[in-house]
Amino acid sequence: MRLILLGPPGAGKGTQAARLVEAHGIPQLSTGDMLRAAVAAGTETGLKAKAIMEAGDLVSDDIVNQIVADRISAPDCASGVILDGYPRTLAQADAVEEMMAEKSLTLDAVVELVVDDRALVGRIVKRAEEAAAAGQPVRKDDTPEVFDERLRAYYKSTAPLTGYYYAKGQLKTVDGMGTIDEVTAEIRSVLSS
Ligand code: AMP
């Protein structure tokens, strides 16, 4: 299964992706995680991405498309993949389509998690508090100030993808306001319909 998870920051894409990994035994490809790893490792990509991520803006399409193209070619992605946080722009959507066409692969579905804007910032702040309490690193962009910028970037560049995938008949919309289990159940249901 090849699946894209769409939704604003804090919608629960990462949480639901982890559950899909468990259910389907295919890898989660989170561009946010890959970029954070590059920043932590101090690679050239990481150095380019660091300040942009900390400001809540989007890293350039070229950089992100390249890291996905490299990762998606790995053997563990052969039987399927869950794209979490990618694509985030129409140019990235074109790029993923090309990557798949080159390998004669198709996208099975795009699942959009819909969550009220007002609930999102609360979830981000909670995630930061929980990470701190667990002694885990706290994301520098999980603050209300940077969140505003991330949401702005979402509406400007990513939200248009819902219309794009709807027009292709691939969009499945899920209410992301329920509990984690409820959202998981709804995703399962839309994927089997
Ligand atoms: P995330 O973990 O998905 O919330 O992503 C964290 C940050 O990484 C975003 O705010 C962007 O700065 C960057 N990022 C992640 N994925 C992408 C993408 N597909 N395109 C551009 N920037 C991205």
Image (cartoon, rainbow, N blue to C red):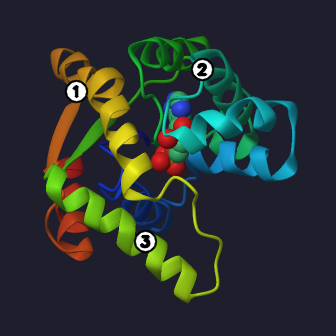
Question: Crowdedness of circle 1 by 10 Å Cα count: few (<14), some, many (20+)?
Answer: some
Which residue type does callout 2 highlight? Ser
Residue lying farthest front? 145
Residue 90's x, y, as percent?
A: 39, 14
Circle 2 sits on which residue? 60
Task: Tell me the distance, in whole angstroms, between the alpha carbons under discs 1 and 2.
Answer: 20 Å
User: In terms of sequence position, does the residue under pointer 3 or pointer 2 come before the other?
Assistant: 2
Question: What residue lies at 27% left-to-right and 42% top-to-bottom?
Answer: 111
Circle 1 sits on which residue? 162
Task: Tell me the distance, in whole angstroms, between the alpha carbons under discs 1 and 3.
Answer: 26 Å
Label 1 CB less than 8 angstroms from ligand 1: no
Which residue type does callout 3 highlight? Arg
- Mark toward the viewer: 1 or 2: 2
Question: Crowdedness of circle 3 by 10 Å Cα count: few (<14), some, many (20+)?
Answer: some
Find numbered disc 2 in the image and state the secondary structure of the residue it sits on.
Answer: loop
User: In terms of sequence position, does the residue under pointer 1 or pointer 2 come before the other?
Assistant: 2
84 to 25, vertically: above or below: above
Question: What residue lies at 41% left-to-right and 20% top-to-bottom?
Answer: 89
Quarter of the image where the N terminus is located: top left
Question: What residue lies at 48% left-to-right and 68% top-to-bottom?
Answer: 22
Left or right of residue 51, residue 90 in this image: left
* Residue 84 visible somewhere in the drawing: yes
26 to 106, vertically: above or below: below
